[in-house]
Amino acid sequence: MLEILMKALRANGIKYDFEKIERAYRLAEEAHKGQKRESGDDYISHPVNVAVILSEYGSDTEAIVAALLHDTVEDTDVALSELKKSFGREVAELVDGVTKLGKIPYSSKEEQQIETLRKMFLAMAKDIRVILIKLADRLHNVRTLQYRSPEKQRSVALETMEVYAPLAHRLGMQRMKHELEDLSIKYLDNYGYNHIVEQMANCKEIGNNLFSSVKRQIRNRLEIGGKTIHIESRVKHIYSIYRKMYMGNKDFSEIYDLYAIRIIVDTVTDCYNVLGVIHDLFKPIPGRFKDYISTPKQNMYQSLHTTVIGKEGIPLEVQIRTWDMHNTAELGIAAHWKYKSGIFGKSDADAKLGWVREFLEIQKDSTEPEEFFRTFKIDFFADEVFVFTPSGDVITLPLGATPIDFAYRIHSDIGNKMVSARVGGKPVEFSFQLSNGDIVEITTSAASSGPKRDWLKIAKTSEARTKIRQWFKRECREENIKTAKEELDKELRRNGIFVKDNEKIILYTPILEKMNLSLDEFYNSIGYGGLYISKIMPRLKDEYNKLRGSELEAEELTVASQTKQSKKLAQNIVVEGVSDCLTRLAKCCSPLPGDDIVGFITRGYGVSIHKADCPNVINCSDDTAERLVRARWDSEKGDFTVNIAIIGENRIGLMADISSQLAAMRINIHNLSAREQKDGSTLTLLTIDVNSAEHLQLILNKLSRISGVYSVERSGN
């Protein structure tokens, strides 16, 4: 294995400290002695392959040494202090950084992934080599994924697609990104992968003939002037074809950039001269030209792209770039690194990683894993559009971006004071999606009242949404707290959580402690959109069940508050094995005739009747479960009242349509009221008579079909 590594290192022409590298190899080989990979190979084969991959990206001696030792601290008896003493602080910190990325003790998959990403970005901001080692580690693991179980194959492949491939893309490491994607999709959709491989094999001869013909024509034209050019060909990589076929609903024959040639020249001027020759030789396809030289991608990629058709009638993508651009396209940030004492200092590469610190700054207040991943995928993996300011400056935004995103990309004050937008000289809505080449003009006003809450739904970039939330957090604290209390109280009631004001702090405390927030900060976060009620509600339900679930007897205290209706319904219940007992309906779930029910023997107050799926029943302790008894409805006849909540479009006639539908069904209405909600919809509350759970479901189904009704559900009784 040592010979394989040394051969790879000598091949790339970089001056290495071979003595130091060999010492690291010997230590790793001894530390991992007896350990095997799933393939049956000695474990040392893994760190050696990781080091070989890094050598292909021009990594320095310290990175190669750290790659060889990256698993020793975690998987063997080697201590970090030993590495520091033998190989220096720099190597020890690299190994420590890689080791820590794998040690994140969070209970949920979402929390683990978000903390993994955050730690990666922190490591990138300090020393990019930590992430390069981690990417090389993942690439070799995916290359040998065939030896893992099917469940592990899918898990690793999915994580690779969601985390590591986007990172490689954002770092400009296209060669690594493509291999990670192609290997991963093989395990995520083996049928689709094999279908594409088969199609590519069928047209291999066509591609070879095309490349041979095109290369000959180009050389005959370009080398007349004595300039040396390099031409290489490639077939589109598998996952890129997969995306267009299975996500874009295209047939294999509709992939126009299946074949591509790359022309590498010496200067930028040569790039544009070659482009003219290509368009003279072949017919260009309109709308398929992209100039990434004048407007580079965010991951530093530069090249001219055009798609042409030759006499063979086959579309061909042509990429034209200089050697510097080519190295950047293949190696990404690894082609630019310059170190100051081994750590990124004020260098060209450091400047190119400024986006890492910006991303960390934008996401520092994020509490939602889904929001973090949405941001990650949009900011790192979305296609881009290039738009212009009126003065001609180029602004790069993700595909689907709006004038709101444009304004906040320029400056927070521009976004906060924006009152109108024009694209190409014409007024547009703030939801207008920008396209390549658009000239965007933003009008601001000192009298502006600030951003609107619905901008959070329109904005595409995390940068814009974060700055909008920051404005509401700073400027509307009291309003945020008031709004959050109202919305949270409504959601608690809707989910059957009934707590007094003095009990709420008990309910919220575990969440407050986990997020390190005061109660007002908690409300404020909900109010300005930093924390979603829908995300914390499952946790609140769990806490409520802990508060109430193991103490079903707490229902005993509410016997005196039973309604006349509840007492009447309770008389129609048969408790198996118990006769002449007092029964009552539990307020926590308010069972209705037709619902599956169960009884709970209380201390001195008879039997409390719950729905069989009541959380208090499901989550009761083993000791408490002994007091559960079978129960059923004796008679399901007789009217009783229920409350219904309807959310619908704010339109004239909605209440009239609801009333008409109920009248047609001969339903008695005790109460009907409506009010507009903050999102513009209408909440209608009803109290009606029904005679069974089936009757109630029929009514709900009928009401849900009314035009403009979004949702209909039974609310607490």
Image: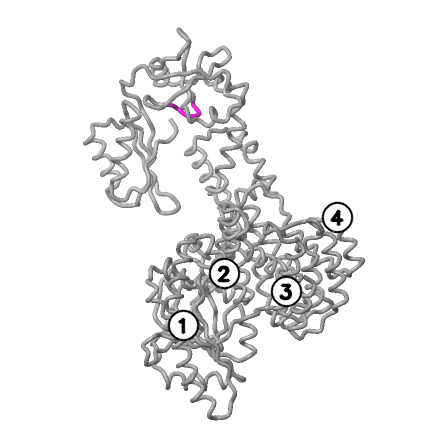
Q: Which of the 4 quarters of the picture holds residue 126?
A: bottom right
Contact? badges 2 and 3 (CB < 8 Å): no
Q: Single out the residue that lies furthest toward the bottom.
A: 225
Q: Main secondary structure of the magenta part?
A: loop
Q: Single out the residue that lies furthest toward the front.
A: 40
Q: Amino acid at mark 3?
A: Val
Q: Is residue 675 above or below residue 54?
A: above
Contact? badges 4 and 2 (CB < 8 Å): no
Check residue 52 in the rendering and tell me which mark sits there, or answer none. 3
Q: Considering depth in this image, is 472 or 33 the residue closer to the camera?
A: 33
Which callout, 1 or 2, points at the residue further toward the start of the chain? 1
Q: Amino acid at mark 1?
A: Tyr
Q: CA distance from mark 1 to mark 3?
A: 30 Å
Quarter in which the N terminus is drawn = bottom right
Question: What SS does tag 3 mark?
Answer: helix
Check residue 379 in the rendering and tell me which mark sits there, or answer none. 2
Which callout, 4 or 3, points at the residue further toward the start of the chain? 3
Q: Amino acid at mark 2?
A: Asp
Q: Which residues are magenta?
A: 587-591
Magenta stretch contains residue 424: no
Q: Is residue 486 above or below residue 99?
A: above
Q: CA distance from mark 1 to mark 2?
A: 28 Å
Which callout, 2 or 3, points at the residue further toward the start of the chain? 3
Quarter in which the C terminus is drawn = top left
Q: Amino acid at mark 4?
A: Asp
Residue at 56 percent across and 55 percent down: it is 144
Check residue 77 in the rendering and tell me which mark sits there, or answer none. 4
Q: CA distance from mark 1 to mark 4?
A: 51 Å
Using the rendered image of the protein, determine whether residue 23 is visible from the camera's viewpoint: yes
Q: Considering depth in this image, is 665 or 483 the residue closer to the camera?
A: 665
Which callout, 1 or 3, points at the residue further toward the start of the chain? 3
Q: Position of residue 36 (x, y in %)?
A: 65, 50
